[in-house]
Amino acid sequence: MNTLTHNVFGYGSLLWNPGFAYLQVGKVWLPNWSRRFWQGSTDHRGTADFPGLVCTLVPNPGQGCWGLAYVVADSEWPEIRAQLDYREKDGYELRALCARGDAGELQCWTYVADAHNPSYLGERPVHELAWRISRAAGESGANADYVLRLHQTLLELDIEDPHVAELATRLTL
């Protein structure tokens, strides 16, 4: 029996909707990266004419991002990767990053959309991010619903994320 596994780090919608079977899941810390709503979404939460915003990871030395590591069987990885490649198609690239969990360091696969992709919108004042999010919608629904669901999920997981919390507060005022 093949006991090899892969770890998938989820920090956005994968937290509540992984969309794949996994063997186990645990909370992990990804050092030197932060979750930010700087990636444009022309498919899931916006359109080509009015992109929404979804989160990506940005390098942030000295900081970090909590998320979930999903352990998947090696035999399932090719199919899961193909599904995730399609899901994260709008500017995301698969990367191997080192997270920290209860058992120590853990290599995880995750998707990062950086400034070199055409859908990247980058850093903006929070009020501009909230304005765009409040007006955008795509094939997966309203952009604001994504932010509010992420915020709620982070609270349920006992994860503090000031960036997401501030956006959620602005969207509910």
Image (cartoon, rainbow, N blue to C red):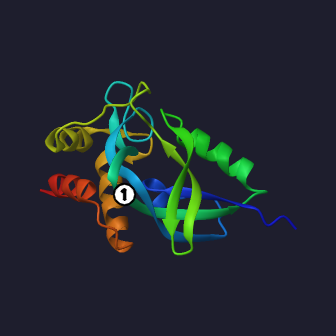
Query: Where is the N terminus found, in terms of image quarters?
Result: bottom right
Q: Residue at x 38, y 58 (%)?
A: 65
How many marks are shown on the rendered structure?
Answer: 1
Residue 46 in percent (x, y) is at 36, 36
Q: Is residue 130 visible?
A: yes
Q: Residue at x 58, y 63 (%)?
A: 70
- Which residue, given by chain and number where applicable, does mark 1 sit on? 64
Q: Residue at x 29, y 66 (%)?
A: 160
Residue 47 in percent (x, y) is at 38, 31
Query: Where is the C terminus found, in terms of image quarters?
Result: bottom left
Q: Nearer the viewer, residue 136 or 31?
A: 31
- Dot 1 alpha-carbon crowd within 10 angstroms: few under 14, some 14 to 19, many 20 or more: some
Return the residue found at the far front.
62
Return the residue found at the far right.
1
Residue 52 in percent (x, y) is at 33, 37
Q: Residue at x 31, y 31 (%)?
A: 121
Q: Is residue 19 visible?
A: no
The answer to whether 122 appears left or right of 87 in the picture is left
As drawn, 22 above or below 122 = below
Q: Nearer the viewer, residue 48 or 100?
A: 100
As drawn, 87 above or below 27 = above
Determine which quarter of the picture holds residue 136. Answer: top left
As drawn, 140 above or below 100 = above
Residue 116 in percent (x, y) is at 43, 26
Look at label 1 and name its amino acid.
Gly
Q: Secondary structure at mark 1?
A: strand
